Image (cartoon, helix red, strand yellow):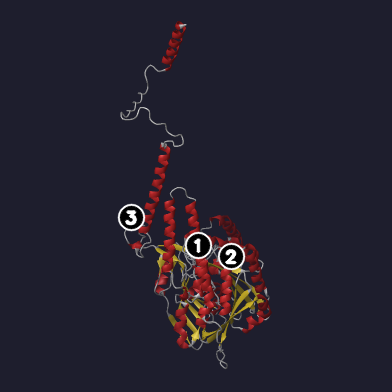
Amino acid sequence: MSRALSLRRSLLHLRHHRAKPLFPTTPPPPKPIQNPFAPLNPARKFCTSPTPTPSTNSEVRKYIGYAALVIFCGAATYYSFPFPGNAKHKKAQLFRYAPLPEDLHTVSNWSGTHEVQTRNFYQPENIEQLEKLVKENNEKKARIRPVGSGLSPNGIGLARSGMVNLALMDKVLEVDEEKKRVRVEAGIRVQELVDGIKEYGLTLQNFASIREQQIGGIVQVGAHGTGARLPPIDEQVISMKLVTPAKGTIEISKEKDPELFYLARVGLGGLGVVSEVTLQCVERQELVEHTFISNMKDIKKNHKKLLSENKHVKYLHIPYTDAVVVVTCNPVSKWKGPPKYKPKYTTDEALQHVRDLYKESLEKYRYTALSESAVTIIYQPCFPSLFIISYLLRIAAAKSSDDNEPDINELSFTELRDKLLALDPLSKDHVVKINRTEAEFWRKSEGYRVGWSDEILGFDCGGQQWVSENCFPAGTLAKPSLKDLEFIEKLKQLIEKEEIPAPAPIEQRWTARSQSSMSPASSSAEDDIFSWVGIIMYLPTMDARQRKEITEEFFHYRHLTQAELWDKYSAYEHWAKIEVLINILHLIFCSKGVFLWMHITRQGKNWTPTRSFLTICWKSCSHYRKQIERLRLLVDRLYCPFVNLLGASA
């Protein structure tokens, strides 16, 4: 028995010995040195409290590192931004942007929706410098584009290739008191012109909403005022001087060449730089403005009377309400004088409910933001201290913003509206509240106002904004078609159906026809009238993400109106408000036809052989290249080479 057991042990020992390598590949790990003072029988550990594993410790260290990185980045950002106004002229420093080149000019439009940087920005002081500039760029085959005050919402005059601005050519050259005509340099602003000729008892026949446009730009883009008996502003032009690359300076007028004159009058800067303009003026006179609120039912009854009996008239429609603000302007009666009217409400009383809504909305949105922060803290098991700090910082920022806020009692209605919209510009419910408040404001602001025409015909458009305005025929003054009111009804129904956060107002104005071929109100019938309708979305904040969201919503809004209404009512979009992402074929065929474009191209080739001004406005739309090339081939077969879009003057 003992012999069998010993044999078994020997076999097991031999098996264990052969399982091991003869020479170990790695040295055995050293035995840990035991603590001599440790007890021989340590207490048994509880199974519910295991020793932390190294992986858990590494996770903790990782998150601590992340937290330190966030704090460091926040501190670096705080001490680095914002920059002082002259930062671009300083040397590059740690956490600072490198300085911009000194010859790089940044030019943007008034609304901040379009911006370009160029090294070629010219401001000639006289016509000799302008002629030299155009000639040199033509020889170098360089493209430049005339740019005015930059008020066009689409930045029509902006170009990276180069721009020429005539702001230094702003003189009144000649005043003919007998014929009531004035000859000016094209860079003069509307307000400067009006101030310069008022001593002669003259003024312009009509005005757009803003007075800061340059005369060259306001004529070339086909701008307009309001009044069914008054044509767009280009009809006030008697003659023009154009600086062209091929023919130098040429003067065009109705007497010399009517076809070219009507073609170049609204030329978008495409046939040359307008250097001088001769305008037909009228006697300076005081106007009485009457503002009252109505509704669509009453407007339909009195529409013909309002158009025919008032020199200037416009409607301000307020989405999600039935309110229509009517503004009429007429010369002060020499016999009756200005009307005697005492307003029912003071300015403060008319604005009080707007201020109350702003205070209420401010508290609501601040409470919502802080509540969301508090919820975030509750549901963050890791590092709640960081979120508590963030929460406290939000409270401090809110208090600081309150301290920096201007007194709301000093803000105008449009400024209050911008602040209200900035709280939640894309919330339909919030915008509806603001629109109803605006309707109430106009109800309390009914009354009369007397002043000179250049003071009365202006309009406070509010802050930065996206705008789309189109023009369509509305019958004649003797027999309005009422298509203009039908258009508004369809538009408001579309807004409500699609739940678009459309702010007020939808501005509607009227003009007589224009003889300029490129004008949206062009017509051969002398008694035709046209309605101009503008939709809007404000950009009340400088936050890039929020501005991007507003922009996307606006283009959705604009696309819906285009798809549902434009073709049905034969509407053409205002040249200063066409965005470059529009479908090129739709633009070409809906903007006076291919043959007009061919005619422009023929004249453009004669005057600008290198196409210095015949620039492509939507060069960024690469997905339209095939359509452009097909259209080019089609027109080549028919008549002459084709230019996609003329250069522009804003």
Q: Considering depth in this image, is 564 or 240 the residue closer to the camera?
A: 564
Residue positioned 40% across, 31% down in the render: 43
Instruction: For mark 2, give the secondary structure.
Output: helix
Secondary structure, mark 3, is loop
Going by the numbered disc 3, the residue's amino acid type is Leu
In the rendered image of this protein, does residue 441 appear above or below residue 547?
Answer: below
* Tag 1 residue: 367
Residue density around tag 1, few if under 14, some if 14–19, many if 20 or more, within 10 Å? few
Q: CA distance from mark 3 to mark 1?
A: 38 Å
Q: Residues within 10 Å of mark 2 (few under 14, many from 20)?
A: few
Q: Of label 2 and label 3, which has the lower sequence position?
A: 3
- C-alpha span from label 2 to label 3: 46 Å
Residue 573 image offset from top left, x and y in percent: 58, 68
Amino acid type at image mark 1: Tyr
Give the x, y percent position of residue 353: 54, 74
- Comparing 414 with 154, the one in front is 414
Mark nearer the viewer, 3 or 1? 1
Q: Nearer the viewer, residue 649 or 593?
A: 649
Q: Nearer the viewer, mark 2 or mark 3?
A: 2
Residue 562 in percent (x, y) is at: 62, 64
Q: Quadrant of residue 102?
A: bottom left
| Residue on which disc 2 sits | 429
| Amino acid beneath label 2 | Asp
Q: Residue at x 64, y 82 (%)?
A: 308
The answer to whether 249 appears left or right of 531 in the picture is left
Q: Are marks 2 and 3 in contact (CB under 8 Å)?
A: no
Q: Which residue is mark 3?
A: 94
Precedes in sequence: disc 1 or disc 2: 1
Dot 3 or dot 1: first in sequence order is 3
Q: Residues within 10 Å of mark 3 (few under 14, many from 20)?
A: few
Element carrying mark 1: helix
